[in-house]
């Protein structure tokens, strides 16, 4: 009695409660699966729960698509925040290829073929093949689903066993985009100043760019999280995201409120919020809730990532700027802050909280020090004429080291341009001698 092979399939044999030998197919070629089923049947015989295979009620064997829908719903009930994105990856990339396959009939060779097909698959927009990261992310969701299928005993073993090199390397489809995934100082100031951008979105962009937070952190901020009376700068507690969900890293932090953001929030609280929501804000209200009439069922709720991204792209197009991600606001603040002379360790504590480094865990920066560093960041609102000049004229950027773009200010903006006053005069076609004449 034990495990044996018939053709390529593993079978098990064991004695039933009456001492009769029972032979049962595992349906798979994996010896470990057969050993596991053998031990399970032995336990059932010992505990008196065993049922003869011929009388065992076999539930309908689900297809990949059927099990995927059930799994998605279970993840949603558990409150998994990323399930909307994961469900989209399954429905867009996995189910069209193997959705009709019976889940427990999948073998590693089938999954290898799936990955190969994903690497050859066209994007939904028809603009070339799927990016390597998209392939890896889609496979990762399917792998987690199969892991859960093993746990709930829908399948005996996961088919997600790939040889080395089957998955594409972690690289961007467009190698050049990441170096440009950042906003200049002028673009940030345009997004928070230009009146062609709706007021509520200007406030949301200020919250996003001047805290260096993730989209969920900016979306989930409520008035009760903000203390404008704190000195020397106001305090914004970042301990949750979206609708009071836990943070991605689980590390809460307190962010000094930049003077520009403080002024924007004061105006919004006094006038703008009531203009959009028809009432004064309550402490439990989101600072910038959903206000679009097209989403009336969600008015007053938190702002969703996808909706906010589409709005950002529309606003950038309105301003004549190229599209970027919301997450690039995080990189932008850190970059501008470091180029403005902020202490990197203090800035990291403000934007990321405590790191996993033991030394950092034993370092608590005084509030005054954090405020001092955040106040160094030179981002302010601009007038209409200044915004137009900054974004659409001959304002240029220079590189102060790799990855640290710095706006070269135009004359008359209160910031000394690169090259000094003489260089500015020469760009204008005049020198001090000419001007005196």
Image: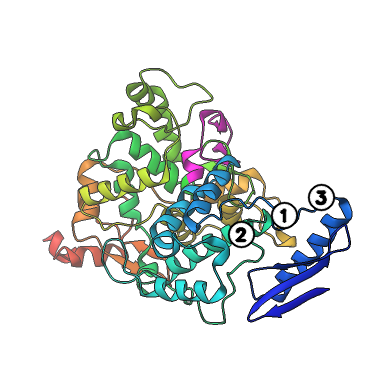
Determine contact: label 1, label 2, CB under 8 Å.
yes
The nearer-to-camera label among 2 and 3 is 3
- Label 1: element kind: loop
Toward the viewer: 138 or 357?
138
Q: Residue at x 42, y 26 (%)?
A: 269
Neighbor class of circle 3 (other Cα within 10 Å; few <14, some 14-19, many 20+) is few
Q: CA distance from mark 1 to mark 2?
A: 10 Å
Q: Which residue is mark 3?
A: 49
Q: Which residue is mark 1?
A: 363
Q: Residue furthest top?
A: 279
Colour logic: rainbow
Residue 212 position, x and y percent, is 48, 50
- Relative to 88, residue 194 above or below: above
Q: Which residues are magenta?
A: 216-242
Q: Is residue 80 visible?
A: no
Marked residue nearer the N-terminal end (2 or 3): 3
Residue 2 position, x and y percent, is 81, 73
- Label 2: element kind: helix
Neighbor class of circle 2 (other Cα within 10 Å; few <14, some 14-19, many 20+) is few
């Amino acid at each position: 009695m034990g495990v044996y092979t018939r053709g390529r399939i593993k079978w098990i044999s064991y004695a039933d409660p009456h001492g009769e030998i029972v032979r049962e197919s595992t349906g798979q070629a994996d010896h470990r699966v057969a050993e596991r089923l053998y031990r399970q049947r032995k336990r059932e015989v010992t505990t008196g729960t065993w049922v003869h295979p011929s009388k065992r009620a076999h539930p309908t064997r689900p297809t990949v698509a059927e099990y995927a829908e059930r799994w998605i719903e279970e993840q949603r009930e558990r409150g998994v925040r990323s399930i909307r994105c994961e469900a989209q990856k399954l429905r867009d990339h996995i189910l069209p290829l193997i959705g009709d396959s019976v889940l427990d009939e999948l073998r590693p060779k089938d999954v290898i073929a799936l990955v190969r097909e994903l690497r050859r698959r066209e994007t939904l927009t028809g603009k070339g093949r799927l990016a390597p990261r998209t392939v890896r992310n889609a496979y990762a969701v399917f792998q987690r689903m199969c892991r859960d299928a093993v746990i709930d005993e829908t399948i005996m073993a996961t088919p997600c066993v790939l040889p080395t090199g089957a998955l594409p390397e972690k690289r961007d489809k467009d190698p050049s985009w990441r170096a440009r995934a950042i906003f200049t100082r002028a673009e940030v100031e345009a997004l928070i100043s230009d009146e062609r951008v709706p007021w509520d979105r200007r406030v949301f962009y200020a919250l996003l760019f001047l805290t260096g937070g993730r989209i969920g952190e900016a979306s989930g901020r409520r008035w009760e999280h903000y203390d404008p009376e704190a000195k020397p700068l106001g305090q914004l507690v970042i301990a949750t995201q979206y609708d009071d969900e836990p943070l991605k890293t689980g590390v809460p932090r307190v962010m000094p409120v930049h003077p520009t953001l403080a002024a924007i929030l004061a105006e919004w609280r006094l006038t703008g919020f009531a203009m959009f929501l028809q009432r004064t804000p309550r402490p439990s209200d989101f600072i910038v809730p959903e206000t679009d009439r097209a989403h009336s069922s969600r008015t007053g709720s938190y702002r969703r990532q996808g909706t906010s991204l589409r709005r950002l792209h529309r606003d950038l197009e309105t301003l004549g700027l190229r599209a970027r991600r919301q997450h690039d606001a995080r990189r932008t603040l850190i970059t501008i802050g470091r180029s403005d002379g902020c202490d990197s360790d203090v800035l990291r504590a403000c934007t990321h909280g405590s790191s996993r480094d033991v030394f950092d865990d034993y370092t608590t920066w005084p509030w005054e020090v954090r405020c001092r560093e955040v106040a160094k960041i030179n981002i302010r609102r601009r007038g209409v004429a200044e915004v137009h000049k900054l974004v659409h004229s001959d304002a240029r950027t220079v590189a102060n080291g790799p990855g640290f773009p710095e706006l070269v200010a135009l004359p008359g903006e209160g910031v000394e341009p690169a090259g000094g006053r003489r260089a500015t005069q020469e760009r204008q076609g005049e020198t001090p001698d000419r001007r005196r004449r």
